[in-house]
Amino acid sequence: MSDAARWKATVYVGGLAPQVTNANVVDAFIPFGEIVEVKLPKPDSSNSGETHKGFAYVEFEDSADAKEAIDNMDQAEFFGRTLKVSQAKAPKSAQEGLGSKTAVWDQEGWLAENAEGEADLQALSGPDPMQGLEELDVAGPKQQ
């Protein structure tokens, strides 16, 4: 199954109580179809005392099963909490977009996509704006 098809068959389940386990999530969602995998992400800090981050991803074999689970489980009560169940979103690449570890303007094609006008597009192929400034290594007025 392709990654795009996998994400269409995956639901996000938010609002989970701290005592909820993988088995509890499987038991709650198995009536809607065959489950491939359940992920309960762990907190970054191991000394927080939490067993998971309060949400899960449930991957079904079929995207129609995922839609059925969303329709039936969104806003349902589970372990005393109201669940938020929706279509899972594919994670963004760590190298692209906001939140990446690379500056937006250094990313491949960002300026071409976001150029405001002809001047911005010219900057892509024009001369280096820092050219000729090599001698200006001291700040302040020119010495006479």
Image (cartoon, rainbow, N blue to C red):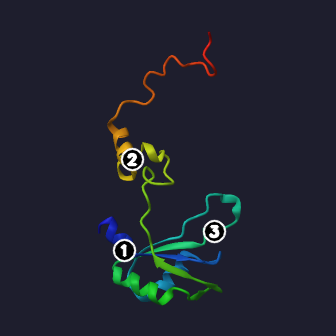
Q: Which mark is residue 107?
A: none
Report how far apart the C-alphas of labels 3 and 1 lie in the structure.
Answer: 27 Å
Considering only order in the chain, which callout, 2 or 3, is on the residue closer to the N terminus?
3
User: Label 3 crowding class (10 Å Cα cut-off): few <14, some 14-19, many 20+?
Assistant: some
Which three-letter amino acid code belongs to the residue tagged 3?
A: Thr
Image location of residue 108, percent across then percent down: 36, 46
CB of mark 1 within 8 Å of CB of mark 2? Answer: no
Q: CA distance from mark 1 to mark 2?
A: 31 Å
Against 127, residue 93 (above or below) is below
What residue did someone put label 3 on?
51
Give the labeled residue for mark 2.
111
Q: Please tell me whether mark 1 or mark 2 is closer to you in this view.
A: 2
Q: Relative to 53, does residue 135 appear above or below in the rendering?
A: above
Which residue does the numbered mark 1 point to in the structure image?
8
Q: Is residue 118 left or right of residue 13?
A: left
> Which element type, helix, strand or loop, lies under badge 2?
helix
Of circles 3 and 1, which is in front? 1
The quadrant of the rendering that contains the C terminus is top right
Regarding residue 54, the answer to whether it shows in the image is yes
Q: Secondary structure at mark 3?
A: loop
